[in-house]
Image: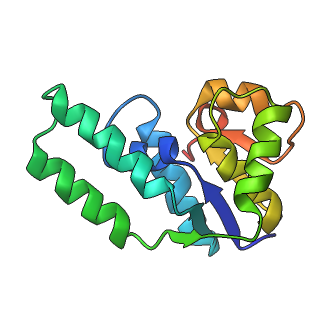
Amino acid sequence: MNSFVVVDASLAFKWLVKEKNSDKALALARSWDDEGIRPVAPHLMPVEVANALHRRVVREELTLRTATHLMEYLVASGIELRETPNLHGRALELADQLRQSAAYDVHYLALAETLKCDLWTADEKFYRAASPTAGNVHWIGEFSTPV
Protein backbone atom coordinates (compact mmCIF):
# COMPACT_ATOMS: atom_id res chain seq x y z
CA MET A 1 0.00 0.00 0.00
CA ASN A 2 1.23 3.48 -0.88
CA SER A 3 1.90 5.73 2.08
CA PHE A 4 0.47 8.80 0.30
CA VAL A 5 -2.93 9.89 -0.90
CA VAL A 6 -3.64 13.06 -2.85
CA VAL A 7 -6.49 15.18 -1.53
CA ASP A 8 -8.08 17.98 -3.46
CA ALA A 9 -9.45 21.29 -2.20
CA SER A 10 -13.05 20.12 -2.28
CA LEU A 11 -12.27 17.31 0.16
CA ALA A 12 -10.05 19.45 2.41
CA PHE A 13 -12.83 22.06 2.58
CA LYS A 14 -15.19 19.43 4.00
CA TRP A 15 -12.74 18.92 6.88
CA LEU A 16 -13.20 22.57 7.78
CA VAL A 17 -16.84 23.41 7.07
CA LYS A 18 -19.76 21.14 7.92
CA GLU A 19 -21.71 20.29 4.79
CA LYS A 20 -22.89 17.19 2.93
CA ASN A 21 -20.33 14.35 3.23
CA SER A 22 -18.21 16.21 5.82
CA ASP A 23 -18.72 13.28 8.19
CA LYS A 24 -17.37 10.89 5.55
CA ALA A 25 -14.42 13.19 4.81
CA LEU A 26 -13.47 13.33 8.49
CA ALA A 27 -13.86 9.55 8.89
CA LEU A 28 -11.68 9.00 5.83
CA ALA A 29 -8.98 11.29 7.24
CA ARG A 30 -9.07 9.38 10.55
CA SER A 31 -8.72 6.07 8.71
CA TRP A 32 -5.67 7.39 6.83
CA ASP A 33 -4.15 8.55 10.09
CA ASP A 34 -4.76 5.11 11.64
CA GLU A 35 -3.11 3.44 8.63
CA GLY A 36 -0.13 5.82 8.46
CA ILE A 37 -1.20 7.27 5.10
CA ARG A 38 -0.13 10.89 4.60
CA PRO A 39 -2.29 13.31 2.62
CA VAL A 40 -0.48 15.34 -0.03
CA ALA A 41 -1.63 18.05 -2.42
CA PRO A 42 -0.23 20.44 -4.99
CA HIS A 43 0.72 23.90 -3.74
CA LEU A 44 -2.48 25.34 -5.21
CA MET A 45 -4.74 23.49 -2.73
CA PRO A 46 -4.57 26.05 0.12
CA VAL A 47 -5.23 28.83 -2.40
CA GLU A 48 -8.39 27.07 -3.59
CA VAL A 49 -9.55 26.42 -0.02
CA ALA A 50 -8.91 30.06 0.93
CA ASN A 51 -11.03 31.13 -2.03
CA ALA A 52 -13.88 28.82 -0.98
CA LEU A 53 -13.70 30.19 2.57
CA HIS A 54 -13.70 33.75 1.22
CA ARG A 55 -16.88 33.02 -0.75
CA ARG A 56 -18.52 31.89 2.51
CA VAL A 57 -17.41 35.13 4.19
CA VAL A 58 -18.81 37.22 1.33
CA ARG A 59 -22.14 35.37 1.63
CA GLU A 60 -21.99 36.01 5.40
CA GLU A 61 -22.05 32.28 6.16
CA LEU A 62 -18.73 32.57 8.02
CA THR A 63 -17.04 35.44 9.81
CA LEU A 64 -13.65 36.55 8.56
CA ARG A 65 -12.18 35.54 11.92
CA THR A 66 -13.60 32.01 11.63
CA ALA A 67 -12.41 31.65 8.04
CA THR A 68 -8.93 32.81 9.04
CA HIS A 69 -8.79 30.29 11.90
CA LEU A 70 -9.99 27.49 9.61
CA MET A 71 -7.28 28.36 7.09
CA GLU A 72 -4.62 28.37 9.80
CA TYR A 73 -5.88 24.97 10.96
CA LEU A 74 -5.62 23.57 7.44
CA VAL A 75 -2.09 24.88 6.94
CA ALA A 76 -1.03 23.39 10.30
CA SER A 77 -2.78 20.05 9.67
CA GLY A 78 0.26 18.40 8.15
CA ILE A 79 -0.91 18.05 4.57
CA GLU A 80 2.30 17.85 2.58
CA LEU A 81 2.35 20.28 -0.34
CA ARG A 82 4.29 19.03 -3.34
CA GLU A 83 5.44 20.44 -6.63
CA THR A 84 6.70 17.75 -8.98
CA PRO A 85 8.59 18.17 -12.26
CA ASN A 86 6.21 18.69 -15.19
CA LEU A 87 3.15 18.86 -12.89
CA HIS A 88 1.70 21.80 -14.78
CA GLY A 89 2.46 20.36 -18.21
CA ARG A 90 0.86 17.04 -17.30
CA ALA A 91 -2.14 18.88 -15.86
CA LEU A 92 -2.61 20.65 -19.18
CA GLU A 93 -2.47 17.33 -21.03
CA LEU A 94 -5.00 15.78 -18.65
CA ALA A 95 -7.29 18.82 -18.86
CA ASP A 96 -7.35 18.42 -22.63
CA GLN A 97 -7.79 14.63 -22.46
CA LEU A 98 -10.65 14.88 -19.94
CA ARG A 99 -12.17 17.90 -21.70
CA GLN A 100 -12.00 20.07 -18.58
CA SER A 101 -12.79 23.77 -18.88
CA ALA A 102 -10.19 24.58 -16.20
CA ALA A 103 -6.86 22.99 -15.29
CA TYR A 104 -7.04 23.38 -11.50
CA ASP A 105 -8.65 20.02 -10.72
CA VAL A 106 -6.37 17.97 -12.95
CA HIS A 107 -3.28 19.17 -11.05
CA TYR A 108 -4.38 16.82 -8.27
CA LEU A 109 -4.75 13.96 -10.72
CA ALA A 110 -1.34 14.71 -12.25
CA LEU A 111 0.22 14.63 -8.78
CA ALA A 112 -1.49 11.32 -7.91
CA GLU A 113 -0.27 9.90 -11.21
CA THR A 114 3.32 10.96 -10.45
CA LEU A 115 3.19 9.60 -6.89
CA LYS A 116 1.40 6.43 -8.05
CA CYS A 117 -1.28 6.84 -5.41
CA ASP A 118 -5.00 7.48 -5.09
CA LEU A 119 -6.74 10.82 -5.43
CA TRP A 120 -9.76 11.55 -3.26
CA THR A 121 -12.20 14.31 -4.18
CA ALA A 122 -15.55 15.66 -3.05
CA ASP A 123 -16.15 17.06 -6.55
CA GLU A 124 -18.58 14.58 -8.07
CA LYS A 125 -18.51 16.25 -11.50
CA PHE A 126 -14.72 15.92 -11.71
CA TYR A 127 -14.92 12.34 -10.41
CA ARG A 128 -17.40 11.43 -13.17
CA ALA A 129 -15.12 12.99 -15.80
CA ALA A 130 -11.89 11.39 -14.55
CA SER A 131 -12.88 7.99 -13.18
CA PRO A 132 -13.58 6.23 -16.50
CA THR A 133 -9.92 6.59 -17.52
CA ALA A 134 -8.18 7.06 -14.15
CA GLY A 135 -8.78 4.11 -11.86
CA ASN A 136 -7.12 5.87 -8.92
CA VAL A 137 -9.76 8.62 -8.52
CA HIS A 138 -12.25 8.23 -5.69
CA TRP A 139 -15.28 10.30 -4.69
CA ILE A 140 -16.09 10.89 -1.02
CA GLY A 141 -19.69 9.83 -1.64
CA GLU A 142 -18.49 6.25 -2.24
CA PHE A 143 -16.72 6.03 1.11
CA SER A 144 -18.54 3.99 3.74
CA THR A 145 -17.99 5.29 7.24
CA PRO A 146 -17.01 2.58 9.72
CA VAL A 147 -19.76 1.52 12.10
Q: Nearer the viewer, residue 37 or 71?
A: 71
Residue closest to the far right: 133
Q: Quadrant of residue 141?
A: top right
Q: Residue at x 50, y 51 (%)?
A: 27
- Between residue 76 and residue 105, name the one nearer to us: 105
Quadrant of the image containing the N terminus: bottom right
- The percent coordinates of residue 26 (x first, y second) are 45, 50
Q: Tell me: 84 left or right of 145.
A: right
Return the residue nearer the eye: 25 or 86: 86
Scheme of image coloration:
rainbow
Quarter of the picture containing the C terminus is: top right
Q: Position of residue 34 (x, y in %)?
A: 57, 70
Based on the displayed image, in which of its 4 quarters is residue 96 positioned?
top right
Placement of 111 over or under 133, stated as above or below: below
Task: Count the labels in the image.
Answer: 0
User: 133 left or right of 7?
Assistant: right
| Above or below for 92 versus 37 | above
Residue occupying image coordinates x 86% and y 41%: 134
> Based on the displayed image, in which of its 4 quarters is residue 74 positioned?
bottom left
Q: Is residue 92 above or below residue 57?
A: below
Image coordinates of residue 112 in percent, x first then y, are: 75, 58
Closer-to-camera residue (68/2): 68
How far across and down, in percent of the image, does residue 35 sit?
64, 71
Residue at image position (18%, 25%) is 59
Q: Residue at x 90, y 35 (%)?
A: 133
Above or below, comparing residue 99 to residue 88 in the picture: above
